[in-house]
Image (cartoon, rainbow, N blue to C red):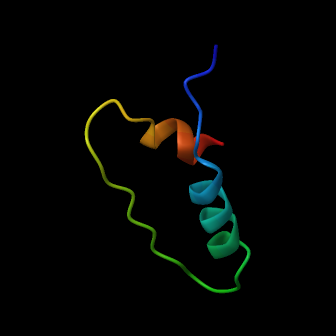
């Protein structure tokens, strides 16, 4: 089973930001072992 559950809102927000023109700086932070890297890889 995938540990990537319940991140629909975050994925939509990242996709919205990435679809804009120009340079963007995105800071992803949180506790350890909550799926930040997996979120960014999706």
The N terminus lies in which quarter of the figure? top right
The C terminus lies in which quarter of the figure? top right
Residue drawn at point x = 38 percent, y = 64 percent? 27
- Horizontal side of residue 5 vs 12, given as left or right: left
Percent coordinates x, y for residue 21 in the rendering? 70, 85
Residue drawn at point x = 56 percent, y = 81 percent? 23
- Horizontal side of residue 20 vs 25, given as left or right: right
Residue drawn at point x = 59 percent, y = 32 percent? 4
Percent coordinates x, y for residue 22 in the rendering? 63, 86
Percent coordinates x, y for residue 30 in the rendering? 29, 49
Which picture quadrant has residue 16? bottom right
Front residue of 6 and 31: 6
Which picture quadrant has residue 9? bottom right
- Horizontal side of residue 29 vs 37, given as left or right: left
Q: Determine whether 42 is above or below 26 in the image.
A: above
Q: Determine whether 32 is above or below 15 in the image.
A: above
Q: Determine whether 27 is above or below 25 in the image.
A: above
Front residue of 38 and 24: 38
């Amino acid at each position: 089973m995938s540990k990537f559950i319940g991140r629909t809102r975050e994925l939509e927000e990242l996709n919205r930001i990435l679809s804009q023109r120009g340079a963007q700086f995105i800071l992803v932070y949180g506790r350890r072992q909550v799926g930040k890297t997996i979120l960014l890889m999706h």
